[in-house]
Amino acid sequence: MELIQSQKGKDLLLSDGYRYRKARTNTDGSVSWRCAETPCRGRFKVSLENVVVNVTRHSHAPDPAKNEAKKSVSNMKGEQRTPLRNQGS
């Protein structure tokens, strides 16, 4: 899992070839993410300890090349990347 900034300054989570945008912070402190590809309904939930709690199925194949391109653009702009530990799955 890796956290980068979008062109609009929003958080994007990259994981297993999929790209997620932040959907909300839940009352228990966990964070819900939604697949950035429309109209995919894939979701990803991460607890406070950065443990993956839940992942739902995507309606498309993963695209690791697109994620690498997004990371490169983020690096060129000097935006911070934060690696996240995956303790769950």
Image: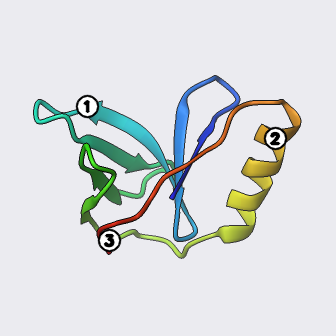
Earlier in the chain: of badge 3 and badge 1, it is: 1
Q: Mark 2: which secondary structure? A: helix
Label 3 amino acid? Arg
Q: Residue furthest top?
A: 8
Earlier in the chain: of badge 2 and badge 1, it is: 1
Residue hosting label 1: 25
The circle drawn on residue 75 is 2
Residue hosting label 3: 57
**Up-down relation of residue 53 to residue 49 (above or below):** below
Residue at the (70%, 29%) spot, across then down: 7
Q: Position of residue 68 (x, y in %)?
A: 75, 60
**Up-down relation of residue 39 to residue 21 (above or below):** below
Q: Residue furthest right?
A: 76
Q: Mark 1: which secondary structure? A: strand
Residue 78 is left or right of residue 15, and the answer is: right
Residue at the (34%, 36%) spot, across then down: 23
Label 1 amino acid? Thr
What colouring style does the render use? rainbow
Residue 75 is left or right of residue 16, and the answer is: right
Residue at the (37%, 48%) spot, across then down: 34
- In the rendered image, which quarter is residue 9 located in? top right
Q: Position of residue 30 (x, y in %)?
A: 22, 41
**Which quadrant would the C terminus be assigned to in this image?**
bottom left
- In the rendered image, which quarter is residue 3 located in? top right
Near mark 1 (Cα within 10 A), the count class, few <14, some 14-19 or many ≥20, is some
Residue at the (32%, 71%) spot, across then down: 57
